[in-house]
Image: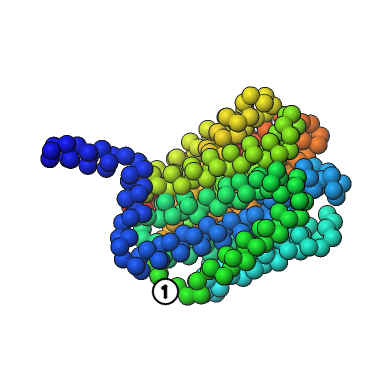
Amino acid sequence: MCATADFAARCIRRTTWAKLLYFWCLDWSHPMNRESRTVTLVVSIASATTTTLPAFLTGALAVVIRHHLDLTTTQLGLLVSTFFAAAIPFSLLIGPRVKLLGVERLMRIAVASTVLSLLTIALLDSTFLSILVSLILAGAANGVMQPTVNQFLVGRIKLKGQGLAFGIKQAAVPLATLLAGLAVPLVALTIGWRYGYLGAAIFGIVTFVAIPTTNKGSTEQGDRTATKVVLGPLIILAMGMAFGAGAANAMGAFLVSSNVHSGFSPGTAGYLAAIGSASSFITRIMSGFFADRRRGNHLTVVAAMLMIGAVGYLLLSLGNPELVVFAGVLAYAAGWGWNGVFNFAITKTHPGSIAHATGITQAGLYCGSLLGPSLFGVLVDHYSFAVAWQVNAVFAVIGAIAMWIGRRALRAELAGRDLGA
């Protein structure tokens, strides 16, 4: 009997999902731990999702908005790109000043600004210019939110659980694309595309109310070491982020339109995009979970995932309806599932300058997200979806190479410090 029980215990300990459950149950009996961890993770993903929704909702609803407002594919790409362009200066300026200005205060300002932009699109007569202005406001809010929510997470989550925490927080992006994809068949094609923005605004209002007004649960993990920002390697890594995220955000903005071009109905195309987003959602969480249990090499994992994602983009370029589901899942899961691991690596190497360091790399992501959808739209208008997907694959490969080079440069700068890039 004892031998059987011992064997069962060993099996449970070796099961990945059992380990995941064990992590969540760790210290669960303590009310403060339970409340602090749950509130932190829920608020983090809700806040990041809210400030990301305007861009991906616009991309997913493009097939409907284009006909109502008579917009070209290039104009739609410009709308999404403008969102990310507005985020760049705010990410760089706010990052070093997050602690000074107040983490929770900045999060509430960012969410409130996003809600205002969503309500403007939903309730007022929309033109290309009015949507453009609204997305500029939403992009600025997202630029404030990303480095701020990184500091919020690290200040409240213990070090041994930060990989999973970042995976969950970064799952906000595929969650936003999943919701945006579902908005096509469930909202845009039934009651109207404006209701998609209205629903997102309501979600944002709930999120605003949920954001804590104080930082009572802080573990001050972000302040455990005063760390100088190593600018050179971070710029290289930001370039990797630019190419990788540029390809991924172009996919998020145009996969529905591409699937429609391949012969699917808009509703089915929305569901297919939602399936891909779900795969990225799961990958980000699981990759963060395994990052907590791996000693270093996080940026190597990021580079490998980008290379696999490039294969998914190439398969999408074939335009074969039979491959769309597999290619979409591969591109989303690998090509867009690495962000949590990346941010975890940056925070581990800059434990005292988390918002500053991730603000720099996030600016790279915004640069890529600015250029990626715009270039994709231009390539589709002047060539084809096939050419656009092939260029996406090249971008992902360049991003992987930059990650590998940046990792080597970062390790050289931080030689002798056990921070595990």
Left or right: 126 with respect to 402?
Answer: right
Judging from the image, the colouring scheme is rainbow
Where is residue 38 shown, x and y percent of the image? 43, 61
Left or right: 261 with respect to 13?
Answer: right
Where is residue 213 shown, x and y percent of the image? 51, 75
Q: Which is more toward the observer, 71 or 235?
A: 71
What residue is at 55 percent from the left and 42 percent from the top?
278
What residue is at 52 percent from the left and 52 percent from the top?
170
The vertical placement of 275 against 239, above or below, is above
Q: How many numbered marks appear?
A: 1
Where is residue 138 shown, x and y percent of the image? 68, 61
Left or right: 394 with respect to 116?
Answer: left
Which residue, as the protein is rendered here, is positioned at the far left?
Answer: 2
The vertical placement of 15 against 316, above or below, is below
**Which structural element holds mark 1?**
loop
The vertical placement of 141 against 238, above or below, is below
Task: Please identify the quarter of the rendering in which residue 330 is found.
Answer: top right
What residue is at 65 percent from the left and 54 percent from the top?
53
Which residue, as the protein is rendered here, is positioned at the far right?
Answer: 70
Q: Which is more toward the observer, 398 or 259?
A: 259
Figure quadrant of the N terminus = top left
Task: Please identify the quarter of the rendering in which residue 4 is found.
Answer: top left
Q: Which is more toward the observer, 289 or 85?
A: 289
Where is residue 165 shown, x and y percent of the image? 44, 55
Q: Residues within 10 Å of mark 1 (few under 14, many from 20)?
A: few
Residue type at numbered disc 1: Lys
What residue is at 71 percent from the left and 66 percent from the top?
116
Specify whether residue 342 is in view: no
The vertical placement of 272 against 179, above or below, is above
**Which residue does the numbered mark 1 point to in the structure image?**
216
Specify whether residue 305 is in view: yes
